[in-house]
Image: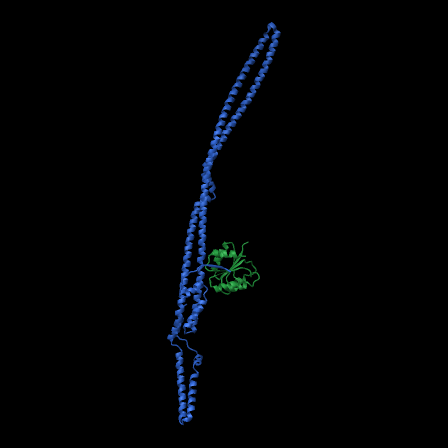
Amino acid sequence: MSTEPTTKSQSNPPARSASSILGAQPWRPLAAFVIGAAGCLLAAPHWQDGSFLALLCGVLSAALAWQRSGSGEAAARPASGSNVVGTALMVSHVVPVWQRHIEASKVEAEKGVGGLLQSFSNLHDGLSEAARHAEQLEPSVSAGATDEALNENAAAVDSLLEPMRTSRAERDAMVTEMVACSERLAELGRVSKEVRELARHTNLVAFNASIEANRAGPAGSGFAIVAQEVRVLAARSGEAGQRIHDQLNAITARIDRMRKQAELNAVSDEELELLARRRAREVAGALLSRLAASVRGSRELREAAVKMNGELEQVFLNFQFQDRLTQMLDIVGRDMARLAEWVQSNPTATHADVTLWLETLERSYTMEEQRTHHHGNVAIDRSAAVEFF
Amino acid sequence: MAKTVMVVDDSGSFRTVVKLALQKSGYEVVEAADGKDACGKLDGRKLNLIVCDVNMPQMDGLTFLKHLKTEPNYKFTPVIMLTTESQESKKAEGRAAGARAWITKPFQPSQLVDAVNRLCV
């Protein structure tokens, strides 16, 4: 809004209406004439030739009074210089108040924008920090993280299973041995059966030999054949017996081996257990280590998120400056328009006008800061308040 | 079911600030640009709370509040005045008209949400 109203009043003083002129002075010349004439008429009877003189005095009085009322009208209309003084009085008192409001608006805007910029900068830093934490966590939280962890620890996991595999192989070997033993035992059974058969047959032959011998008497030639058969049978028995002996030795040796193997397995099992425990501890340790890193990273991310939440609250707070700014400038704008309209119809102003104007302006304020600025302080100091009724 | 809050303010950007703060806390938000617009939206919809500015064109917040108390469906709906006004006389006017709380701008979103949580029916 410009200051033209002041300039306009200086160069083109507004004309007063005719009714206002007459309304101010009409009775004076008439009253002067009447009074002058009345006075003269009262005195006239005592002056023979004074009546004409009295009338002349009355007319002159009226003329003088008329003239005076004319110059009084001019006096009543202020010179263009005093119009300027009157309006300048208003401007000199009201404009500084506007200036303080505008200055306060600038301060408000600078604070608000500065706060927003700082908040956005802090948010940016927070997001960068969160991204960095997320990168560090990535191997732990990505989709293939489990496979990767297993691959990295495959050797350790295999080493846990290796003792088990060894144990199983050893047991398989033992089973094989036992099967072989069983086969040998079966063969031994057959041999034993054969020996029994031989023995039975031998008995039969010997019985027949004795019968023949008795019968032959001196001639006993048949006995010789019998005796030959008995020898053959005996040899066969002897061979069978040897085979049984050999088999028994073999079985004994195998059993002995099995015993030693079993003893060895007993020692291995203890060692296996210790080894498995150690390996399991190593794998668990590696997994826990990764888990701890994940937990640490999650905590850091949570802290970053809390920090960013706080910054967002600040953004919300700082953003509200524009609402206050709008209200401050709205009131100044409206007051400027009001003054421009006022000076069009009010060429003069008094201190009382100024006081009334400023009081009206102050009543239009909605914020405490506006009242403070009104009286000379542009500092902004406020705190949000919540009051429950 | 989410609770619904009506926000009445002549500043569009300010309504957005309040809306974001409340939606983040799980509330549904209905907006109105001033008291007259808000009256037009008292159409029987469920409102659990109203947040209202004081200085608005067409119909200011206190006038709207007084009108609200004549609406059978909404006379018990709690109202929080959210405004730059801090004069005690204005607060007294608000209290007399039936406001349940008075928040002076600028405000922390958490303060508003706490107040809404406390008063929401």
Residue B35 in view (yes/no): no
Q: Please tell me whether residue A314 is drawn above or below residue A43 in the rendered image.
A: above
Count the labels in the image: 0
Task: Identify the chain drawn in green.
Answer: B
Residue A284 can be seen in this image: yes
Residue sitting nearer the eye, A352 or A87: A352
Give the percent coordinates (x, y) of residue A282: 45, 37
Q: Quadrant of residue A57?
A: bottom left
State the residue in front, A263 or A113.
Answer: A263
Q: Residue furthest top?
A: A218
Which coloring applies here? by chain
Q: Which chain has been coloured blue in this picture? A: A
**In this rendering, is residue A236 above or below A386?**
above
The image position of residue A115, as x and y in percent, is 41, 57
Q: Looking at the figure, which quarter contains the N terminus of chain A?
A: bottom left
Which residue ends up furthest to the left in the rendered image?
Answer: A81
User: Horizontal and vertical percent for residue A188?
Assistant: 55, 21
Front in this rendered view, residue B104 or A217: B104
Tell me which residue sits at (54%, 14%) in the image.
A235
Q: Position of residue A177 (x, y in %)?
A: 51, 26
Residue at the spot 42% in from the left edge and 53% down from the top edge: A122
* Residue A322 lies in quadrant: bottom left
